Image (cartoon, coloured by chain):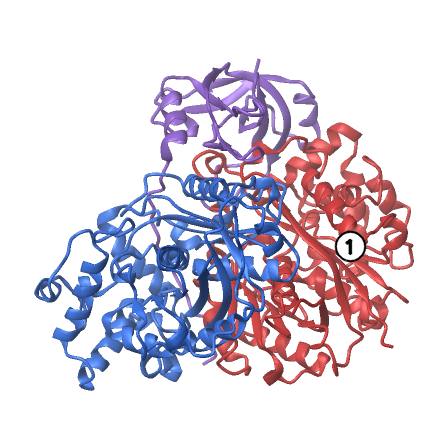
Amino acid sequence: MATRALIAGAGITPATSPRKQRSSSLELVQEAVWAALEHSGAAPSSLDGIVIGNIDGFEGTVLGAKHVVRRLGLGTELPVSILNTGGTTGGNLIQVAARQVRSGDRHRVLCVGGPTFFGAEDLQSAINTNSPMVVEQPLGMGAYHMGAFYPSAYAERFGATVEDFAVSAVQDHEHASRNPYAHLRNTLTVEDVVSAKPLSSPMTMAMVCPVSTSANALLVTSESGAAGLRPVPVLIRAMATSSDPYLGGGKNDFAVMENLAILARKVYQLADVRNPREEIDVVEVFSPYAPMQPMQLEALGFAPPGGGIDLIRSGATRIDGDLPVNLSGGPLCTNAGVAGELAPYVYVALQLMGDAPEVMQVPGARRGLAHGTGGTFFQFENLAILERQERA
Amino acid sequence: MTRLNPSAAAQDPIPVLGLAATPLVPESNAVLDELVFDAVFQALREAGIRKHELGLSVTASLDIYDGRSISCGLTNAASGGYLAQSYRIEGDAGQAIIAAAQTIAAGDADLALAVGVYNPEVSAPDRRAFLQQISNYAFEPHFDRPVGLSAETVLGLHAGHVVDSGELSEEQLAEIAAAAITRGSARAHAARRSPVSPGEVLASAPVNGVLRELMLPAECTGAIAVVLGSLARARRALRPRAVLTGWGQATSDTTASGQWLHNPAVAARRAAQEAYRRAGVTEPGEQIAAVELTAATPALLAPTLDALGLAKGGVEVAPSGGALSSFPGVANGALRLLEAVRWVEERGGQAVAHSTDLLTGTVADTATVLVVEGV
Amino acid sequence: MTITTQRVHWDLNYDVHLGATWGRFMAGLTERKILANRCPDCSRVFVPPQAYCESCFVRTGDWLELPSEGVVEAFTVAWQSFRGGPTPPYAIAGIRLEGASTLLMHYVRGLDLSDPSNVREQLPPGTRVRAVWAEERTGQILDIAYFEKV
């Protein structure tokens, strides 16, 4: 029996660096899962599925989820689906869980985002195996370098300077300073960002995500599965994914996030959103590199081409603006792998429920947009519109 | 012309519109995405639809076999994912097929594709050792890995236990294996292409405990794609091949509990219950005519049949020869479906396809069960 | 004694399959040829060549040789590398070879990378570059050693 999918619980652990992290990967996941269950009020025995992500090369285990899921105090019978789409795994978890629920097969599915980067010494080398080997990998392009192509082309097209790109970094950090779960909570000035060590032009070290450890979990339910649970339910109103070709060279214009723009139109159509700027109350975009954010906001229809930086500069995307963006601080301040990619969905859900920490809560948020991206040259995108469902 | 009239007992009948496999060979001399493209292209053509009509593509593959982190980046476009919806499950293709079916049952797509691809990027002589190395890496890192646990070891432990308990003798294991291999040897997708005798099975290279090489799955490589459609859309498809009437998925427990030893097919049991419920099958022993199951060793045949509720009754067991005849790694779930579909195309009635990922043997495996009926 | 971590090591070697399409491309490189192929439906030209067109979803058809010159459409400079990576700084560009519908990613050498602030002006939009071949070519992308400004 087809049904709609709702989010009815969320759990998240405070993030820190791998060096300072005292809990094991398993303990972090346990903490997040139990936080989600407590938040929702759902008994563990009422769950009927787990959807979890592993990015094997980054984790030092193959399908480590197989062992983790049986150590969560949830019994030994839950069916387990393990996803791996690299940087979009977190965002995809929720879409897979939503379909399991929407099909009528499941009523309460737990989506689990683990701290992927935990413990990987050769992380960048492992990440590099994602680069198309044989034809692009030998060019020494790590993730930063691939990410830099976009702002480089954007700068060429619209004349953006390093100072311009610093603006979203300053803002993400300002927001993170009010997020008790964020990893990097220091505030920065434009000067701080600009004068940081150059990384891959036009990016500096202050413009790229940290390696964080944290875990999170979301409870996705059917309409009947949400009954009796504590939080105000959040409807997954529309969701979709879209992919670019594998080779970086297969894109067209690096000054535009073309794949995301195509996806945005699809999702807005599904949700019947006519004017995104007016109809969306809170946004979490996945911008692990600060210069991506203005480009993403343009692709999402919040600003015209070349207008993304002005939008941020205008204050519209601050907590007190009309389009709050990344009140969590985004991945620029906390990037814990799969947990990092699930985070936009966790934070938007909490905002719509009215259950975000008070200092970062947007009052009266009803409709939110959550976004994730990843893969070589950010090949993959995922997007969802979430809506608060007032109880009758 | 289609004459779709699926059983009214099925909750969400989902026609299978296309099913295609690349040649299943010991080592495919192709890049993974080329294998995926060939299978997907064929399946779409058979279904009479274009890639652009697909609502979702789900791929089953494993980074670690593919030699790349996020290997789905490479195969995504070949699965039809360019500017479209897609994701990748790390597990057996049966899970991808179920995910595609769920999407249609959810009303989120009218056409969905599942594809499994398996071509470990290690050349032949070293391959077995490589696959077991990967299997070892999939075990719990602090306790299981250091003591050499691997899929073969787990299977060997189980088979040894079955022999020690008097349930089956080694000769009987060999008979079961020989029958399966011989049955499958003349068929299109067989990896073991010659009949064998129980003596030859016993004489094959010892691998682990009582298990000889010919008592373990017949490894092969390739890609297999399945196109599913909603009943509404399928009525205008070229030639639906079968109807998927039920599906179920379950995961077994990890090493410590010993479930892998004493109750090795528990995941198959729960998956089957779910699938039969969806399909409206109340007496599997009487209603199911054939079962394409995945038994990694002869010792697992009886427990699996029992778990599937098919130990009694006249069901035809693994007419294709099963995993001992052909086992294309994570694409196996799609091969089992392909064989089950061929069965119902020839004989009508209902059949079951069962698969599991053998990455860690019977430890924490995820089993899938599909019920299909003829058109 | 507080034990909090345990080393887990992977030692994996692969022989990655090239397939016929990339295999032919690599063979072309040994002969100092940059080969591409074309989609029979939309006529897009792919370099590196592709076995299929992802957009039309058909097998590609004709092969052609492209000139080894083109225009830089996007680039970046890596000021920091990664373990096992090349020694920084180095520049990588997306190059539109004449006639190609895709960009070829490759190194650009011969730039003055001593000062991050004067890098952009060395590769303004439309900068033409040409391939410089390696002395010894063995059938890999680095048979083109790098591109340089014309």
Which element is circle 1 on? helix
| Residue C59: x %, y % from top left | 47, 31
Q: Is residue B343 visible?
A: yes
Residue that numbered label 1 is attached to: A172
Asked if residue A101 lies left or right of residue B159, the reply is right
What hue does chain C carry in this figure?
A: purple
| Residue B142: x %, y % from top left | 40, 73
Q: Is A331 or B350 nearer to us in this picture?
A: B350
Q: Is B116 or B160 nearer to us in this picture?
A: B116
Asked if residue A41 lies left or right of residue A248, the reply is right
> Residue at point 23% right, 57% down?
B184
Q: Quick one: which chain is blue?
A: B
Pointer 1 chain: A
Task: Using a 10 Å C-alpha cutoff, classify the residue at mark 1 as few (fewer than 14 neighbours), some (14 to 19) or many (20 or more).
Answer: many
Q: Is residue B308 visible?
A: no
Q: Quadrant of residue B261?
A: bottom left
Number of callouts in the render? Answer: 1
| Residue B85: x %, y % from top left | 62, 49
Residue A224 drawn above or below residue B184: below
> Residue at point 37% right, 77% down?
B285
Q: Quadrant of the N terminus of chain A?
A: bottom right
Residue A45 drawn above or below residue C138: below
Q: Quick one: which chain is red?
A: A
Question: Which amino acid does the dot numbered 1 rest on?
Answer: Asp
Q: Is B346 or A336 nearer to us in this picture?
A: B346
| Residue A392: x %, y % from top left | 87, 77
